Image (tube, rainbow, N blue to C red):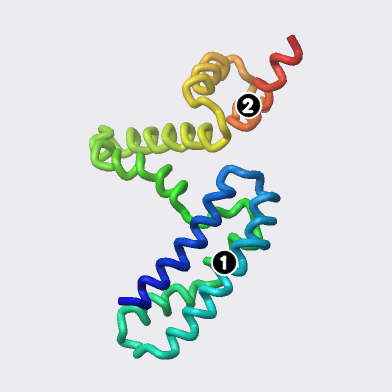
Amino acid sequence: MPLAIEAVRQIDAIFAAEATINGKPAAERLAVRQRDIAPLVSALEAWMRAERARLSRHNDLAQAMDYMLKRWEAFTRFLSDGRICLTNNAAERMLRGAALGRKAWLFAGSDQGGERAAAMYSLIQTAKLNGVDPRAWLADVLARIADMPQQRLHELLPWNWKKQQNMAPSAA
């Protein structure tokens, strides 16, 4: 089907351009997106709207185009914010561990055991999202938490703990 091939070709060009800025700072990603990627996205939208008008509403490709065009604003949001990723692959990769462990977690022993496992999983993922080694963080927190006054517990949160760790070498 030539229309589907053309759609994939245009989408591939967008992803190829995006691949050149992966890992760059948000401001740089935004500048490249506005300069190089936005015209590709605009061309894809114009092409899709023109081709969609020629197709029957029962056509499978027309239904796929309708799906994307109805969500165009959400799809193009990455063009106005350098922090937003073109795909949700990173988020899905992070959830993969939870999906794979789901069967094992059925046997947490009790509802309370399941809640504890979920809390630990949340803590570990929060540490990872903040660029903190979960093992080092948990080891330090477990060693210190019993002697920590309640009003200072916030210091043990991953983002605050990381700041303390970064400041420690310069203070020594």
Between 106 and 80, the residue placed more toward the observer is 80
Which residue is drawn at the image coordinates 31% and 79% (left, top)?
60
Say which residue label 1 marks.
76
Which residue is drawn at the image coordinates 66% and 44% (left, top)?
25
Left or right: where does residue 36 sit relative to residue 56? right
Q: Which corner quadrant of the image does residue 158 belong to?
A: top right
> Looking at the image, is mark 2 or mark 1 earlier in the sequence?
1
Q: Position of residue 18 (x, y in %)?
A: 55, 54
SS of the residue at dot 2? Answer: helix
Q: Contact, CB < 8 Å: mark 2 with mark 1?
A: no
Q: Which corner quadrant of the image does residue 30 belong to?
A: bottom right
Q: Is residue 169 above or below residue 157?
A: above
Q: Amino acid at mark 2?
A: Lys
Between 131 and 2, the residue placed more toward the observer is 2
The quadrant the C terminus occupies is: top right
Q: Residues within 10 Å of mark 1 (few under 14, many from 20)?
A: some
Q: Amino acid at mark 1?
A: Thr
Q: Position of residue 122 (x, y in %)?
A: 46, 37
Which residue is drawn at the image coordinates 50% and 56% (left, top)?
16
Cα distance between the residues tagged 2 and 1: 34 Å
Left or right: where does residue 64 sit relative to residue 22? left
Residue at the far top in the pictured view? 172
Q: Nearer the viewer, mark 2 or mark 1?
A: 1
Q: Position of residue 20 (x, y in %)?
A: 56, 49
Q: Is residue 39 above or below residue 149?
A: below
Q: Is residue 155 above or below residue 31?
A: above
Which residue is drawn at the image coordinates 49% and 26% (left, top)?
134
Q: Position of residue 52 (x, y in %)?
A: 43, 85
Say which residue label 2 marks.
162
